[in-house]
Image (spheres, rainbow, N blue to C red):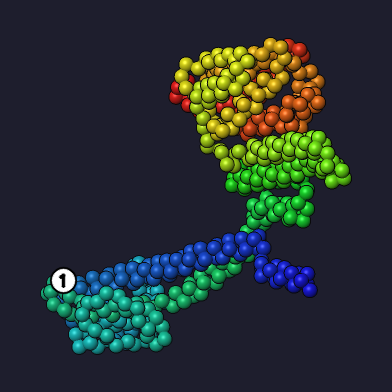
Amino acid sequence: MKFLTKKKKKNQKEGLRGLSLTIKWALASSLFIFVVFTIFAVITYKSSVSLFVEKERKNASQTTKEAVSRLANSNRELNLVESYRTLTNSSNGENSIYDRTSTIEGILMDIDPFISDLGQPEMNMYIYNLQKDLVFKTTKEDMALVGTSQSEPVIVTVNGTSGFIFVQAVVSKETKETIGYVQTFYELSGLADIRQRLLRLLILLEIISLVLSSVLGYFLSLYFLKPLKMLRDIMEQIRKNPQSDIYMPKLETHDELEDVAEIFNEMLGRMRSYIEQQEQFVEDVSHELRTPVAVIEGHLRLLDRWGKDDPEILDESLAASMQEISRMKVLVQEMLDLSRAEQVDVHYANETSKAKEVVHQVFNNFRMLYPEFQFTLDDDLAIEKTVKIYRNHFEQILIIIMDNAVKYSTTRKEVHLTVSSNKRTLEIAIQDFGEGIKEEDKNRIFNRFYRVDKARARDKGGNGLGLSISKKLIENYKGKISVESILGQGTIFRIYLPIIDSEHN
């Protein structure tokens, strides 16, 4: 029942997830392009219509002004003949062939460019006398005078047709008196057709751009999100099989996705390292504690059967059990130290120590603890150096190696300690004159629980973890440790740690 409920919840969650990121990106990019192109189309449409209207207004205004200017050459009240004569710059004899009902259309088209402008189908000009009677027109339709004062052109609708209307009084240039009125109606019949065509074109372009942007956005999202999809697939594989050793392949995108892949691999490596450390810790503890537990159990069984009545056996069993318990405590502590040593980059990444101070302190402590030994310190540091390591860990490393030097010394009870530095590195050398290490053992002494002579190591209280702890600590603080040894003559351990007080170098 619980399994079915979990499965149902999982299916609901997947259903709520909706569209993939690729589709969302494609839709978002399409919507963005659609909005931008719509704004562009609206601006283009408005600008084009405005430019067309402004051009027509200017054209009608110039024609009207030219007509008023020509009519102003007359010094009498305007009538048909006078209007025609002044507009066409004709003589009086030519005017007799026209009456009040005549119109100027095709027959005047060849006289001058101005007459050609008057002959435009859109241009409707009306001339009125002082009594506001129509005396001249360029179209068959009549139109009443809408006013007598000069006005700016405005758009009006006459008989269902939109256009500009101009009204202007004609003032004689000679008498300076008003002799009539000119009213012009410039039809914008072509504007509707232009608007319709432009609107259709912009809608078509917008549809095409929307389709192209959707397709292009989809393929671009596939390309750019490919590393993210790969990362998701790898995470899914790891979720299904945590023990897999799969990693994110190295990307060459040179962007944030490449950084994400590197960080993911680093975190994955660290996580697996912690898992391995945990497994190793459990395995080592179970392995190493088996012997002391077995010894204690054997003594307890012995006491339970008949040894508790024998004081000698009782004392011997208790002493042996206490010794094994003490060794177990030391072993567990060392195992914990080793586990913590593998995580110093998390807890002690910014810790530092004073090199001279720590070295001198450890040196003086060992001189006090082992008065039978001759300890020599060669300090080549002219000034104090700061090293990038937690002080307790620094002391622990020196104590482990110095303690080994004491333990494995033979007849020559002498230990040399040397400290020096170059520009960026602190070097510490610890030399003893004891048993030495075989060549085949030198590469294994830093392994966990490895002891060159297990019998002697047990007598000296060693568990084979000290050097492993030292090496792990040093390496996690970006340092290194090496060993030089000659069997029967002694051993030198060299420790290198990074210096951070570069201003004194």
Q: How many marks?
A: 1
| Point 24% across, 76% down: residue | 151
283 and 245: which is toward the camera: 283
Q: Is residue 385 left or right of residue 272?
A: left
| Point 78% across, 48% down: residue | 244
| Point 35% across, 74% down: residue | 118
Q: Is residue 151 left or right of residue 109?
A: left
Q: Can residue 238 be spotted in the picture?
A: yes
Against 340, is 144 above or below? below
Instruction: Indicate the secondary structure of the residue bearing disc 1.
Output: loop
Q: Is residue 91 left or right of residue 233?
A: left
337 and 65: which is toward the camera: 337
Q: Can residue 111 be spotted in the picture?
A: no
The location of residue 305, given as percent across then percent down, is 87, 45
472 and 299: which is toward the camera: 299
Against 45, is 414 above or below? above
| Residue type (three-letter) at the residue carrying disc 1 | Lys
| Point 67% across, 38% down: residue | 333
Against 194, is 346 above or below? above
Give the quadrant of the N terminus. Answer: bottom right
Q: Is residue 167 left or right of residue 308?
A: left
The location of residue 294, given as percent across then percent down, is 83, 41
63 and 208: which is toward the camera: 208
The location of residue 293, given as percent across then percent down, is 80, 42
- The 10 Å Cα crowd at callout 1, few under 14, some 14 to 19, many 20 or more, is some
The location of residue 336, given as percent across then percent down, is 67, 40
Q: Residue furthest right?
A: 305
Against 193, is 358 above or below? above
Residue highlighted by disc 1 = 173
Q: Residue furthest left?
A: 175
